[in-house]
Image (spheres, rainbow, N blue to C red):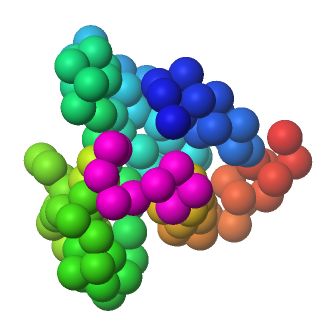
Amino acid sequence: MNIQQLYEFCLSKKGVTEHFPFDEDTLVFKVGGKMFCLTSLKQWEKDEPSLNLKCDPDKAEELRAEYEAIIPGYHMSKKHWNTVDFHSDVNDTMMCELINDSYDLVFSSLTKKIQAEIQAL
């Protein structure tokens, strides 16, 4: 997966918007105004890309134990976020599953009203 594929994959989900709320480097994808995926553009340029993804706390621990590429979220709540490195033991299919899980987790935390608005898009 390259940055363009990541960009297109994330934006293909209902209600997703892109932002740079922290600086010009950190690309953030949100659903319903809440973050579900963050990545550093500079790290992509260095060919050292990674994603910060929201994750269920119990599943986060399991994934960290199973995959070398998955560590506690960099600059995020270590309980609810994982950082996932590309070019390691997580393939593109698994990366897409992790992105989907993060999106679904954040979407399910939205109010019913906002969920319905997004579903209607």
Quadrant of the image containing the C terminus = top right
Q: Which residues are magenta?
A: 86-95
Front residue (pair 6, 25)? 6
Q: Is residue 69 visible?
A: yes
Quadrant assignment, res 44: top left
What residue is drawn where x is 46% and y is 55%? Answer: 91
Q: Is residue 33 visible?
A: no
Front residue (pair 71, 116)? 71
Instruction: Please state the horizontal and vertical placement of residue 24, each as a whole percent of the image.
Output: 27, 12
Question: How many numbered circles does the render carry?
Answer: 0
Quadrant assignment, res 80: bottom left
Instruction: Please state the horizontal and vertical placement of residue 17, each as a whole percent of the image.
Output: 57, 31
Quadrant assignment, res 112: bottom right
Looking at the image, the residue that sits furthest to the left is 75
Front residue (pair 104, 112)? 104
Q: Is residue 98 left or right of residue 116?
A: left
What residue is drawn where x is 63% and y is 38%? Answer: 9
Query: Is residue 69 found inside the magenta-colored segment of the image?
Result: no
What residue is drawn where x is 19% and y is 57%? Answer: 73
Residue 3 to residue 70: above or below: above
Instruction: Please state the horizontal and vertical placement of residue 29, each as a whole percent of the image.
Output: 48, 36
Instruction: Please state the horizontal and vertical placement of residue 84, each as a whole percent of the image.
Output: 30, 53
Q: Is residue 9 left or right of residue 99?
A: right
Residue 24 to residue 121: above or below: above
Q: Main secondary structure of the magenta part?
A: loop
Residue 109 to residue 57: above or below: above
